[in-house]
Image (cartoon, rainbow, N blue to C red):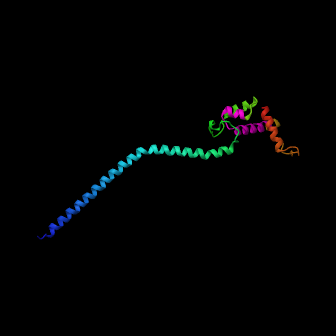
Amino acid sequence: MTLNLTTLAALVAAALGLALFLALYLFCTLKVEIRALGREKAVEAPAGTREGDRRLAEIEARSLAPARAEIEPAAAPAEPSSVPVRPGMNLNRRSQALRLARRGESPEQIASRLGLPTSEVRLLLKIHGKLMQQALAGPPDSGRLKSEGESADNLSSATESSARAV
């Protein structure tokens, strides 16, 4: 039983063809499985993203809590969690705060009524008092030297009294 060279070549070619077919079949089935797995993960991604967003918000809240505690005194507002953090005071709130100050309300009362930090209201009243003092004093006298009695403490107490009067 001798196999001639042509028959042997045909058997080797058939074996290689079968091996090539099996490799191609495994490649295609693996590709289909990977695509199906990718679709499943794509469907699950928004839920994971929402969880990640929630965790990020918790971390930001925890990191901002010590910064808020340093900015505001501990006894300032009774309910610090009820006052949302805002980037700044708009003109409407500023005019409301100044109007309430003219009526004689304290910075703490104004802050709680308008939902603002007490330190921000105090700063607004202090700056407004300085501006009013400058407006009442007239144009600045650049040639005038400060006397010994004038100091920053006297200026700040005068500003506070003018802010209360306004």
Q: Which residues are magenta?
A: 108-133
Residue 16: in magenta span:
no
Name the spot of residue 64 as percent of width and height, x first.
62, 45
Residue 59 falls left or right of residue 36? right
Q: Please give the name of the residue rendered at 63% of the width and 44% of the height, measured from the top-left corner.
A: 65
Tell me the quarter of the image containing the C terminus.
Answer: top right
Magenta stretch: helix, strand or loop mostly = helix
Of residues 47 and 116, the one drawn nearer to the viewer in this rendering:
47
Quarter of the image for residue 120 reads: top right
- Number of marks: 0
Of residues 49 and 134, the one drawn nearer to the viewer in this rendering:
49
Residue 57 falls left or right of residue 122? left
Q: Residue furthest right?
A: 148
Name the spot of residue 122 as percent of width and height, x first.
73, 38
Residue 70 falls left or right of residue 32? right
Name the spot of residue 25 as percent of width and height, x first.
27, 55
Tell me the quarter of the image containing the N terminus.
Answer: bottom left
Of residues 134 and 16, the one drawn nearer to the viewer in this rendering:
16
